[in-house]
Amino acid sequence: MSKTILHIDLDTFYVSVERLNNRELQNKPLLVGGTGDRGVVAACSYETRGFGVHSGMPMKMARELCPEAFVIRGNAGEYSKHSDLVTEIIKEYVPVFEKSSIDEFYADLSGMDRFFGCYQYASEMRKKIIRETGLPISFGLSANKVVSKVATNEAKPNNQLKIDEGLEKPFLAPLSIKKIPMVGDKTYQTLRNLGLRQVRTVQEMPMEVMQRVLGANGGVIWKRANGIDNTPVIPFCERKSISTERTFDKDTIDVNRLRGILIAMTENLAYQLRRGEKLTACISVKIRYSDFNTYSKQLRIPYTSADHILIPKILDLFKNLYNRRLLVRLIGIRFSHLVTGNYQINLFDDTEEILSLYNAMDEIRKRYGDKSVLRASGMGAKTIGRMHNPFNGLPPVVLAHRKL
């Protein structure tokens, strides 16, 4: 049976939510992000893009390029609330869907043509989302995730596009190579240096040439340029919390060791949040003493996924909780009240240097493992780490009880 994959994207999502909350911002240039000169643009309206503004650039530069733009700090909780409204509508309509980010979804409609026209069905769902949420939305429909995503981007703003089976290559051929998912600025420049501008040229090249230039990624890009993609839609399974705990082989009263383990735990869970594009608004610390009495404290905080914000708060909770001066058998932390959101939305007042530092450390961890970059204070906790992304939409893997 041939596949039918739907890609849904909420157009300029943060901007659209801000305009829902304040109608005076309609059709006006709008920047969402850090309000200070050293802040970062989290999202920008279409009106600003003609001036060269894009998300991720320094706010100071964006203001210089588009001085008439309105600048708004943003609210992760509001964005999450509207995203949840859309998620609930999609749940009602489709049998299998994947929520890949706060404003982006994939749905597998394969086989539904027996009962409905997939394009008509997707159109009706889109109309319902617009009617009930007031948010602009675009979608692309094709035989796989890659072509559907490209189709969505071509349909924007607030439109829809279907690519019939067998027409994937002709659809992609005239487009810029930068529109292929996975082609970032660096890869784009490499391909441009080879004289490649359109997807058509990549389609005409042997895969081996791309592999020689870009390694294994070259083969993936070549397949995507040819409309070939077998990536499945991962069924959505929303995770409400993430936690970790360790039991000691020998009960301890070493406070410095306990603090080091808490730092390592917090650092790792914060990385898992960023990897899964999640933010937490509630943190807790748990202690089990040698007499098996267990105590915990929790704290509500502004949405974040940043080590340097979470670690001091976790240590403060531990300081307030650990007052019995008894031997400790188990220690753990938990992040809950999770929402989908970007790291940038949460750290508007941080400098570009801090954002770059987190990005660099996370890239190293993705390539070499969770424990490849550690704070010196947490290096003693050698077993803290995960082998999988806890937010990949699958049920959490139950591991053997690990000890320290």
Image (cartoon, grey):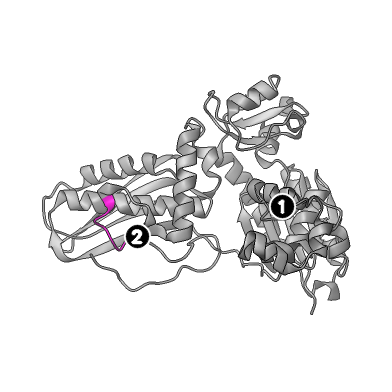
Quadrant (top left, top right, bottom left, bottom right) of the C terminus: bottom left
Sequence-earlier tag: 1 or 2 = 1
Q: Residue at x 49, y 52 (%)?
A: 363
Residue at mark 1 to residue at mark 2: CA–CA distance: 43 Å
Determine whether, in the image, residue 118 is placed left or right of residue 375. Answer: right
- Percent of width and height locating residue 350: 47, 32
Kindly identify which residue carries mark 1. 191
Q: Which residues are magenta?
A: 378-383
Amino acid at circle 2: Thr
Q: Residues within 10 Å of mark 1 (few under 14, many from 20)?
A: many
Return the residue nearer the eye: 34 or 113: 34
Q: Is residue 218 magenta?
A: no
- The image shows residue 289 at horizontal and vertical percentages of 17, 59
Residue 304 located left or right of residue 401:
right
Say above or below: 345 vs 88.
above
Residue 219 in view in this figure: yes
Is residue 219 positioned above or below 295 on the image? below
**Residue 382 colored in magenta in the image:** yes
What quarter of the picture does the N terminus occupy? bottom right
Tell me the residue that label 2 is attached to.
Answer: 244
Q: Is residue 336 visible?
A: no
Amino acid type of the residue tagged 1 in the rendering? Leu
Q: Residues within 10 Å of mark 2 (few under 14, many from 20)?
A: some
Q: Position of residue 233 (x, y in %)?
A: 66, 67
- Is 88 in front, or is 231? 231
Q: Residue at x 49, y 39 (%)?
A: 355
What kind of secondary structure does the magenta stretch mostly adopt? loop
Q: Quadrant of residue 77?
A: top right
Tag of residue 11: none
